[in-house]
Image (cartoon, rainbow, N blue to C red):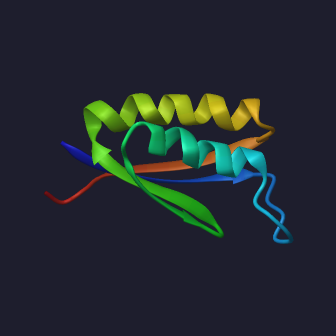
Amino acid sequence: MRLRAEFTTEPFDGEGNPPPHATETFAALEKHGLTCEFGPLGTSVAGPDEALLPALQEMLAVAFSHGASRVTLQVEQADE
């Protein structure tokens, strides 16, 4: 099954470069070979469930270890 996820890491500061908890989560997901889009208000990622679900678990660990106080995550089944 193919899944799509969107997530936002906080704290969010609209000025300057994105914080490490945002950039490092993006890098962690790309390392898994997943299709990612980094945006100003969040990141989206898509892929097969067997690749995406473990990658999301790692993403959460990376976010909190790099200063995130909250991660908001939505996951949905993508159209085939």
Task: Say if 30 sits above or below 49 in the image.
Answer: below
What is the quadrant of residue 39 in the picture? Answer: bottom right
The mark total stands at: 0
What is the quadrant of residue 12 in the picture? Answer: bottom right
Question: Residue 25 vs residue 14: left or right?
Answer: left
Question: Residue 28 vs residue 5: left or right?
Answer: right
x and y percentages locating residue 20 in the rendered image: 76, 46
x and y percentages locating residue 50 in the rendered image: 27, 31
Quadrant of the image containing the C terminus = bottom left
Quadrant of the image containing the N terminus = top left
x and y percentages locating residue 33 in the rendered image: 36, 42
Question: Residue 31 vs residue 60: left or right?
Answer: left
x and y percentages locating residue 9 in the rendered image: 68, 50
Question: Residue 39 vs residue 47: left or right?
Answer: right
Q: Residue 15 or 69: which is nearer the viewer?
A: 15
Task: Say if 78 sits above or below 52 in the image.
Answer: below
Residue sitting at 80 percent across and 64 percent down? Answer: 17
Residue sitting at 65 percent across and 70 percent down? Answer: 40
Residue sitting at 37 percent across and 46 percent down? Answer: 34
